[in-house]
Image (spheres, grey):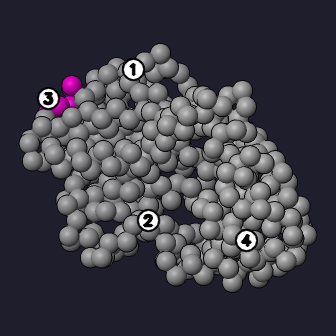
Amino acid sequence: MKPDWSCLKDVKIVDLSQLLPGPHATTLLMQLGADVVKVEPPGSGDSARQLGPAVFAQLNRGKRSVALDLKDAAGKAAFLDLVRNADAVVEGFRPGVMQRLGLDYAALAQINPRFVMCSISGFGQDGPYAQQAGHDLNYLALGGFWSIPVQVHDKVARPRVRVADYAASSHAALALAVAIMSARQSGRGQHLDVSIHDCVMAWTAPAAWAAREYMEQPLESPGVMPENDIFETRDGRHLALGILENKFWMNLRDALGADFPALMDERLAARAGRQQRKREVNTLLAKIFLTRTLAEWLDTLGPFDLPVSPLLDANELFCDPHVRARGMVRDIAAGKTIAMRFPVKFSQGLPDGDDSVPRLGEHEG
């Protein structure tokens, strides 16, 4: 079911991409009303199919699937028929592949001048790294993700989700929506060059630029805040303390000062004082939080206005009362899997889409 009010309700997107960035971008647009036709290679299909049905379903539920060999004359002809009536084509090949297939933007614009092509690649269509292999970690590494000091005891650790891929998919979806609507007004399409590395840089570069001043002594960076960190509790769990504003430090003193008088040290009362004693403050907090269990800390700190949160495990996440109240997660298939709603609530409503997961080539003909 499509939202009647959406400007995307009659938009058609042909998606050649695989794995995460492109399919997630088109999923976002599909949730907002677009019709997405997924073009997959015969036999194997999208590589995400090899990662398990749940992974593929999350990125491709509600789309149509056709299996086409773009190197075959019949397959190419069928693809061109799709493009003639499409608003956009999304592809995730390395630069040059579409041109070698005779299906680059210049060629396709000859048969549909108002269509938009969105090319999502690791490093963009040009530049020294354009042909370099890569995945999420590589784009983060070369995008300066770990160049920014943020913790007193800083360490390099792998992110838990594919941050770079999601950065690119979100930017791609936004760019596609604007380009498609503009093409409908002007009759002229365009080629969108989405570099996953560029999308990472859009987030990291400002902080990385500032971090250059503190490369010899990263602890001095104002981004390293001793009272804004993750701390272990007595039972081996962890809590996140997100103090930025000084009022929250004062609230922490009100909550714990009687039991832990070191927090009442007036040298730590102002943020500037804590910035001058980062190791001391961080070590003090680490020792304090090791004295009680996570549940005890939540009971103790709950009555106070503090940015403190438990690090939820995978089971706790889906039982969390706020998660349930917001309704972002839908249980489907008798609780065997979930579907995520679009993460913005529209006052006119956004109906749940088709939950069916396309079989490879299901919608041919």
Q: Identify residue type, mark 1.
A: Asp
**Residue lying at 67% horizontally and 79% vertically, measured from the top left:** 304
* Residue 22 locus on image (x, y percent): 42, 44
- Whether residue 64 is visible here, answered yes or no, is no
Could you classify mark 3 by the number of other residues whose Cα lies within 10 Å: few (under 14), some (14-19), or many (20 or more)? few
Please tell me the numbered disc located at residue 126.
1
Mark 4 → mark 2, Cα distance in angstroms: 32 Å
Lower position in the chain sequence, tag 4 or tag 1: 1
Measured in 3D between alpha carbons, the distance from the residue under mark 1 to the one under mark 2, in whole angstroms, is 33 Å
Name the residue rendered at 61%, 29% in the picture: 213
**Furthest residue toward top:** 128
Under mark 4, the amino acid is Leu
Is residue 124 in sight in this rendering?
yes
Q: Main secondary structure of the magenta part?
A: helix
Q: Which residue is mark 2?
A: 343
Query: Residue 252 location in percent, x, y?
Result: 73, 71
Of residue 260 and residue 341, the one placed in the foreground of this image is 260
Q: Which mark is residue 110?
A: 3
